[in-house]
Image: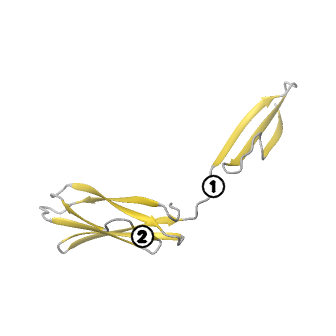
Amino acid sequence: MVAPGDEFVISAGVLDNMPGGRGRIRVEVQSGPELTAAGPVAIDLDLAGKKEAAVEFRFKANATPGSASLRFSARRGDAVARIEDNVSVRQRRPIGLNLHLGASITPAPRFRWRAICIRNSALWKPPFHRCRWSGVRV
């Protein structure tokens, strides 16, 4: 997942599985309107037969939210391999969630208090803001 304005790197692995493969392999990527290329969208590789390599492409997320498709293709002569993947473009939001579990024994030895506190990292204000306390007999 990326947010509008984020710049990130997408990598892809390329394996030359053709027997006796020789020559350059051209790896290209195409994206939907949700992403803009921040670098080259085509890379030429020199791979020997049965070898592999990784390629990296830089992209920047646009303000258009949604599922951004990335279409990769590797081509050597007439042989072509294609694969597609998706990246989610969403608005930036504070989504940190912390869960605090605790217990304390009150002066009465057969009664225990349990606290469950759920907090959003952007809204937390101690002490124990938004906690649910429950008494449990033991």
Q: What residue is pinned by disc 1?
A: 94
Q: Is residue 71 above or below residue 106?
A: below
Q: How many marks?
A: 2
Q: Is residue 88 left or right of residue 38?
A: right
Q: Is residue 114 left or right of residue 93?
A: right
- The disc labelled 2 sits on which kind of residue? Thr
Query: Residue 37 sits in which quadrant?
Result: bottom left
Query: Residue 25 sits in which quadrant?
Result: bottom left
Residues 106 and 60: in front is 60
Q: Are marks 1 and 2 in contact (CB under 8 Å)?
A: no
- Determine whether the residue tagged by mark 1 lies in a helix, strand or loop: loop
- Determine whether the residue tagged by mark 2 lies in a helix, strand or loop: strand
Q: What residue is pinned by disc 2?
A: 36
Residue drawn at the location 75% of the way across and 41% of the way down: 126
- The disc labelled 1 sits on which kind of residue? Pro
Q: Is residue 70 above or below residue 56?
A: below
Q: Is residue 18 above or below residue 78?
A: above
Quote the CA–CA distance across marks 1 and 2: 25 Å
Residues 87 and 80: in front is 87
The label on residue 46 is none
Picture coordinates of residue 64 (x, y %)? 53, 72
Q: Is residue 21 left or right of residue 91?
A: left
Residue drawn at the location 45% of the way across and 75% of the way down: 33
Picture coordinates of residue 95 (x, y %)? 62, 54
Q: Earlier in the sequence, mark 1 or mark 2?
A: 2
